[in-house]
Amino acid sequence: MRPEVESVLITADDIAARVKELGEEISRDFRGAELLVVGILKGSVVFVADLIRHLKLPIHLDFVAVSSYGTSTTSSGVVRFLKDLDESIEGRNVLVVDDIIDTGLTLRYLLDNLSRRQPAVLKLCVLLDKPSRRKTEVPVDYRGFTIPDAFVAGYGLDCGGWYRNLPDIWVVKTATAVRA
Ligand code: PRP
């Protein structure tokens, strides 16, 4: 059964304004440099698409796919690499972009893996941060919004594969979120 959304947590307008600010901040920090933006499939797709259009920098775009959630709403701690980067990152400026950091287990694994490939710079940008759920420390360099411990969907984030297309970010009804 499809889970149900109940209320808007962050509107499309507020997301757009914050994404623009993040793009400007990243552009300032990397001024004069080239950047490889690495989106994490699938949740980051909408955010990455908007963010890169606010980057006043020469960029390349690549994607990785890792899996941590399966079909439940809690992180298993088991992270699988489903698709690796197409490009080498050795000696390059890399910005990892994800939609949400929750337990941090996915990004901890990914950042550890990428840092062993010896990039010049490795930074992390997340749209949403749920700090109350963190199980491992992960330095977040660019953060869109800090949110409470609710299950959310929309703007690329899913619940059981649904709702990635919603322009706003919604809270999912807890009773319907568990099984999707
Ligand atoms: C989500 C999100 C992060 C991860 C965060 O991805 O995009 O990568 O979970 O959780 P964590 O901090 O507890 O590790 P998900 O596995 O749901 O895949 P998706 O991006 O394809 O929706």
Image (spheres, rainbow, N blue to C red):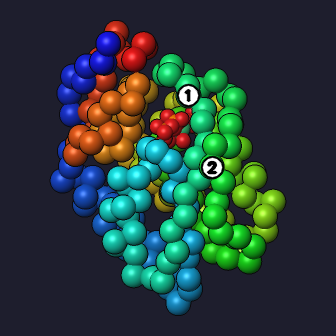
Residue that label 2 marks: 83
Q: Earlier in the sequence, mark 2 or mark 1?
A: 1
Q: Is residue 93 above or below residue 179?
A: below
User: Can you see residue 53?
Assistant: yes
Q: Position of residue 91 (x, y in %)?
A: 74, 77
Label 1 beta carbon less than 8 Å to ligand 1: yes
Percent x, y of residue 160: 41, 25
Cα separation between marks 2 and 1: 16 Å
Which image quarter holds the N terminus? top left
| Residue drawn at point x = 67 percent, y = 76 percent | 92
The residue shown at (36%, 61%) is 49
Q: Amino acid at mark 1?
A: Tyr
Quadrant assignment, res 153? top left
Q: Amino acid at mark 2?
A: Lys
Asked if residue 140 is positioned above or below residue 80 in the image, the reply reads below
Q: Where 110 sits versus 157, above or below?
A: below
Residue name at image x 75 percent, y 51 percent: 112
Callout 1: SS? loop
Mark 2 closeness class: few <14, some 14–19, many ≥20 residues within 10 Å: few
In-front residue for pair 154/42: 42
Q: Quadrant of residue 117?
A: bottom right
Q: Which residue is mark 1?
A: 69
